[in-house]
Amino acid sequence: MIFSSLLLYTIILPHLIYSFPRSFTPQFKVIPPHCIKTPSIIAHPSKGEGSLKSLEMHFSIGLHTTVCFRLEDTNDNSTQSNQSLLHTVTLSSIEHHHPVTQKYNFGIPEVSADCFCECESTERCSSSSYEFIKCPEGKDQTHGCYRTFFPNQSNKSCESSSPMGSNLCCELKFNPFENKTYTAIRLGDPSTFAIFTYVSYDYSGNSWIERDKNTIRIQIDGRSQENNLDSSGLLKLVVSAWGRVSHQLESGMYFTQSNPGGEMEGIRKEQINDITDTNVYQLGWYRQDEKSGHFYVQNGAVIAKNLHGAKVIDCKEQRYSSSLAANFYMPGRFTLPPYVEERHHWIERAAFYDGSMRQVIVSHSEGTNLYIGLHVSKGSEGNVVFLHNSSRIDSFDGSILVDSHSRHYLNLSLSESTGKLNGLIHASESVASPQIHMFTVYVHEVVSTNRSLLVPLPATVDKGRKLVCMRAEEEKEEDSICAVLPYHEEALEIDVENNSWRELKGRCPECNHISYNSFIDNLNPLKLFGGFQSLGDGFTKAADFLIYIIGLIILYLLITKFIIPVCQVIFTDISQVIVQQEKICCVCPLLVAKITQSQRNRSQTEVEIEERRRKMKRNNDVLPGDYV
C-alpha cells in the first residue's frame, strides 16, 4: 500500500509541477502600463569627470500617467539586451502630509431633562441648590449631569401660590450616543510629495519580464531633488519645486471615529471647536477626559443656564416644556457628515499614517502636471527614444451636472476606451453651434475598458442640453463621436435647523403640599428682604412689603378697637367702662345695651322671688326646692 502511494506521487507530482506554471502564468502575465505621448526637450550632452558623458532631457508628466522610453546606444560595444529594455516612469501619486497640531476626544451627547415644579419657594427647589452647580455626587457623574433653575414661572394651576410665580428645577443629563467616541484634530499646513514608480521591462520569449523596479518619494515644495531611478545608477530623476499643487485640503479642524487598537477611519469635515473653545453650536462641546475616560461638558456648570431652556405648562400636574440651545446632539440634531473624499472629488484617500495620529496623508486623484528632468549617464553617445500606445474610444454617455455646492462637472461613462481622449462641448445641441469648452481625459489601462469619470467644467457651460464630442488623440476631429447630454442642477445644500420645544411630565409626589414648616416660613417677614434678581422682582417685593404693613395695621386695630374693649365690657363692671367704651369701641354701645337690659330683667326677677319668700315665711310655709 505504501509502495503504491509512493509510486503514484512519483508519477503525478512532476507532472503537476510542470503543468502549474503553464496553467496559471496567463493570469499573472506581466504587462507594461499604458504609455502616453510625451513631448520632451533634449539638451546637449555634457562631459563630466572621467570622460563620462550624460544625456539630459525635460518633459512633463501628469498624475497616474506613464512615460516610456528606450536607450539606443550607437556604440558597437553595447549589448542588444541593454537596448531592448523598456524603461517606464509613472507619477503614481501626489500626497499632502498634514501635521496634527491639536487633538482631543469627544462624544455626541444624548441629552435628557428631568424637571419638577414647586408652586411655593422651598429648599427642595431653590437657586442655591439648582443654579450653576453639578448634580450631587450620588448621581452618575461619569457622563455629565448639571442642574438648572427657572424662577418666576406660571402658577395658574396652583391653589395657593407666591406672587413671584412657581419655580422649575431641572437636572440635565448627558450620555455618549451609542457609546461612540470621536477624535477631533487640527491639521496644519502640509508638505507635498510626489511618488514615482520606475520599472524596466525586457521582452523575451513572447512575454514581458520585470528587470528592475524602484519607488521614489520626492518633496516638491522645497528645493530641487535628484534621485537614482534604476539600481545601476544609469538613470537619475530631477524634480524641481513647483510650489502648491492645484488642490489642497484647507487647514483646520476635522474629526474621525476613534477605534483604539484597530484601523482608523477616514477624516470628516464639520464645524468643530478648537481645544480651547466651548461653543455649543459647534461639534466637540461634549468632551472626554483622556485620563479617567469620563465625559463632561466644557464649563458645563456655568453654561448650563444658557444651554438649557424650560418653562412650566401646569405646575400642579408637573407638565413642562424643554429645549436645548445647541447643535450636534441627540435625539435628532446630528447627522454624520461624509468623508472628505466624498465631498472633494480630487481626493483619492485621506487617512492617518499610523496609530499615533500625528500625520494625515491626503492622496490626490487628479492634479497638475509636473515638469521633471531625466539624466542618462553613459560612456558614449546615444539616443533616448520615447514610445507611446495608441488611444481608442468606442462610445460614451453622461450628463452635465451642477451639484449642491454649485460645482460644475461632466459625468462621463466611457465604453471600450484607453489612452488619451480629447473632447469638446458645443453651446447647444447643434454641431454648428460655437465650441464653448475643450477638455482631455486619460484612461490609463493598456487594454480597452469601461470607465466613469468626473470632468470639472467652467461656469460658462450654462443651462441646457449640450452636444459633446470625443475622439482618441490620433484621430481627426471629423472622426469624433458625438452625443447630446442632458443638464441637471441640484438645489443648494441648506442645513438650517430650528430647535424645538418638547413637552414632558415630571415626577415629584412630595411637591406642592402645604406643611407646617412652609406655612410658618411664609409668615416670616425676613423673606421679603431676600436678594433682588431684577427690577421687576424689586417692585414685587415692595408691593409685598406694603401689603404686609397694611395687614399689621388691620390686626392692630382689630385687637385694640374690638377684642380688648369687648373683653373689658364682659369682664368689668358696666358702670365703670360704659361711658369710656362707648367712645372707643364700635360695637360696645349695642353690647352695653344688651347687658343693661339683661341686668334689669335679672333684678326684677330677683325682686319678685324675694317678695314671694317673704309672704311664705309669714305663712310659715317652706319654699319649694326649685326656688332655693
Image (cartoon, grey):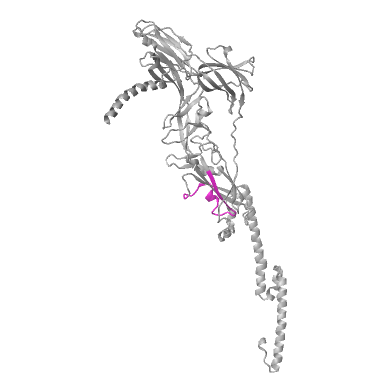
State the residue at coordinates (70%, 86%): 609
180 in relation to 348, above or below: below
Quarter of the image for the N terminus: give it.
top left
Whether residue 578 sits left or right of residue 366 in the image: it is right
Is 404 or 106 nearer to us in this picture? 404
Whether residue 575 sits left or right of residue 485 in the image: it is right
Quarter of the image for the C terminus: give it.
bottom right
531 in relation to 44, above or below: below
State the residue at coordinates (51%, 24%): 346
Q: Is residue 603 magenta?
A: no
114 in relation to 211, above or below: below
160 in relation to 16, above or below: below
Q: Tell me the quarter of the picture where residue 120 sits.
A: bottom right
Is 122 or 402 nearer to us in this picture? 402
- Percent position (x, y) of residue 382? 40, 7
- Percent position (x, y) of residue 211? 37, 16
Confirm whether residue 298 shows in the render: no
- Percent position (x, y) of residue 132? 52, 46
Counting every numbered tag in the picture gives 0
Q: Is residue 113 magenta?
A: yes
Confirm whether residue 14 shows in the render: yes
Whether residue 588 sits left or right of residue 152 in the image: it is right
Q: Which residues are magenta?
A: 111-138
Residue furthest to the bottom in view is: 620
- Percent position (x, y) of residue 556? 65, 63
Is 328 or 431 nearer to us in this picture? 431
Q: Tell me the quarter of the picture where residue 459 sits.
A: top right
State the residue at coordinates (54%, 12%): 475
Is 488 or 182 nearer to us in this picture? 488
